[in-house]
Amino acid sequence: MSDIVDVTDLYHEFGEERLPPGQRETSAFPVLSKSGTPSVAEPDVEVWGAVEEPTTFSFDEFHDLPSETQRQDFHCVTGWSKFDCEFTGVTFPTLAEAVGVTDDAVHVMFHAADGYTTDLPLEACMRRETMLAWGFDGEPLSADHGGPLRVVTPHRYAYKGAKWVTGVEFLTEPERGYWEQRGYSVTADPWAEERYA
């Protein structure tokens, strides 16, 4: 494992302050989910849609992809932010390279073991700091926080970071995930306070 990659300065791209407007910093890591914590063993991770090589990775195979540890900030749409989280996993561009994203892909839908879905434009995913993470602060990611595998999106509100990930679908047309269908923002930029559509 290489040294920790610090991406906590990404806010310069979006706003003047590290803490987005309307957020409060906390040292805690509150647990929020759609319907409680499911019991999830080490899942296969299916990647399909607008890709050259639709692939189902076993959890071990997913671990074999190139990985890194990043220091990130975490912004919840409910108004709290946790600074300096250290997540370990596979960056989204690494996953995309492994399956060969086709030119007609424009959007991504993440699928979770509890039926949760969330979507992002492909360009928002194709950033190094968008990760599929299995580790947090040097330990395996706990089930309450989305383990064995979750998405982290430090440049977006955290509802874009699906917990208990089982699938990544590359779409040729935008579709809406669970909260997006219920009025939450598709773009979810914390510095623009894009909480709701």
Image (cartoon, grey):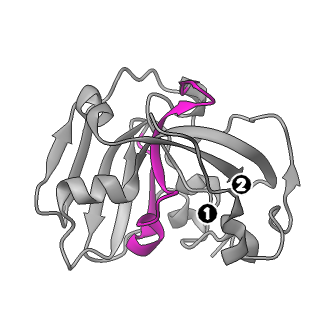
In the rendered structure, the answer to whether residue 78 lies left or right of residue 135 reads right
Q: Secondary structure at mark 1?
A: loop
Residue type at the position of mark 2? His
Residue segment shown in magenta: 115-141
Q: Is residue 193 visible?
A: no
Counting other residues with Cα less than 10 Å from the Cα at mark 1, is it few (<14), some (14-19), or many (20 or more)? many
Residue 59 shown left or right of residue 29 in the figure: left
Instruction: Identify which residue is drawn at 81% across, 34% down.
Output: 28
Query: In terms of depth relative to the viewer, which is nearer, 17 or 57?
Result: 17
Pointer 1: what residue? Answer: 156
Left or right: residue 5 compared with residue 18: left
How far apart are the alpha carbons under marks 2 and 1? 7 Å
Characterize the local packing of mark 2: few (<14), some (14-19) or many (20 or more) Cα atoms within 10 angstroms: many
Q: Is residue 120 magenta?
A: yes
Q: Which residue is mark 2?
A: 75
Point out the tag, 2 or 1, that comes first from the N-terminus. Answer: 2
- Position of residue 116 measured from the top left corner of the image (x, y, whole percent): 45, 46
Please tell me which residue lies in front, 77 or 6: 6
Task: Name the spot of residue 93 as percent of width and height, x first.
Answer: 36, 60
Looking at the rendered image, the quarter that the C terminus falls into is bottom right
State if disc 1 and disc 2 touch (CB < 8 Å): yes
Q: Of the residues shown, which amino acid type is indicated by label 1? A: Arg
Query: Element under label 2?
Result: strand
